[in-house]
Amino acid sequence: MAYSDRIGQDFWLDHAINVIAATYGDRVSVHTKNKDLLKFGRSEQVHTSTKTTLMTLPTGTFNETYASGNDIISVSSSATADTSLELTIEGHTVDASGNFTFVTQTATLLGNTEVNLTTPLARCSRLYNSSAQDYAGTIYAYESDTVTAGVPQTGAKVHCEIRAGENNSEKCSTTISNTDYWIITGAYADVLEKTASTAEIMFEIRQKGGVFREVFEMSCSNTSGGTFRSSHPYVIVPPNADVRMRALASATGTIVSAGMFGVLAKVIT
């Protein structure tokens, strides 16, 4: 039997909750979780022929190489001035069955020196400054690697960054835990270029044990303004799934930003 805890409030949210019950056999509640989720990001190196994830990555690295285990173990800064500053790390651990668990932890930066995470991660979805002083350098979260002056030397080992001069990562990609669904209500994209540029945006989901598949596409340009998509019906991201937004541009090196947002629904018994 279909289940909804939002009857009369939002038809499309009611519909999504009932689709989850009919398709996956799970009863979910948005009231139990009481949490929305916004993921936004940008890339300054969107390519003409290589689909590029809209997140900050080292130059020449266009997409995150996903870890198979809890291999994300370290954080560091490219600036020695970033010492005794707090960094909050959000991400997921994974177990032997491929189930993800959301984890939040805090590390104290030691400038260029690597700092080990208390809990190694399989996914790192967000970094942000939780101290009272701005960061000076680029902050990295990464796997075991050769590190020079706080900078990991292998792009494929980097999973999240805070750009120099910023205090929050920009990563339009995330993972959903074993006990949650993400009901995405909308998405947006924009080209951040002064010269005339366009971009094609791909919204992709990879379910547990599968490959990334496009759910929808949209386009944007800096001449006609950004693109906003209110998703009807809402997009349902099931537990243990990876989700990302990628882009192709009319010129290599185009700066593109995007975001996706919605509510988390917790599986209840």
Image (cartoon, helix red, strand yellow):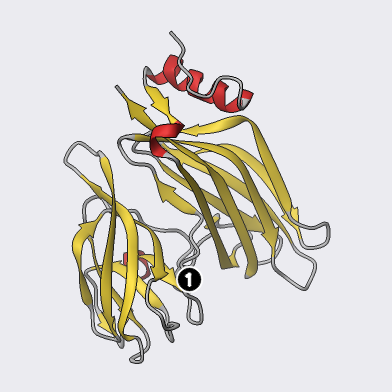
Q: Is residue 147 visible?
A: yes
Q: Quadrant of the C terminus?
A: top left
Residue for point 49% across, 67% down: 56
| x 40%, y 26%: residue | 28
| Image position of 115 with respect to 49: above or below | below
- On the image, which quarter does residue 51 sit in? bottom right
Q: Quadrant of residue 267?
A: top left
Residue at the spot of label 1? 60
Q: Quadrant of the N terminus?
A: top left
Most extreme residue toward the bottom is 81
Q: Amino acid at mark 1?
A: Gly
- Residue at (54% x, 50% y) in the render: 245
Residue 45 placed where, x, y %? 57, 68
* For residue 118, side relative to residue 189 (left or right): left
Say what secondary structure mark 1 lies in: loop
> Could you say which is closer to the camera, residue 227 or residue 207?
227
- Toward the top, the furthest residue is 1
In the image: residue 77, left or right of residue 236: left
Q: Is 252 situated left or right of 161 in this image?
A: right
Residue 6 % position (x, y): 53, 24
Residue 139 vertical placement versus 125 (above, below): below
Q: Nearer the viewer, residue 3 or 255?
A: 3
- Pointer 1: residues within 10 angstroms few (<14), some, or many (20+)? few
Q: Is residue 238 visible?
A: no
Question: On the image, which quarter does residue 101 sit in?
Answer: top left
Say if 23 sits above or below 209 in the image.
Answer: above
- The total number of labels drawn is 1
Q: Is residue 6 above or below residue 115?
A: above
Q: Locate residue 242, reporting x and y percent.
A: 40, 44
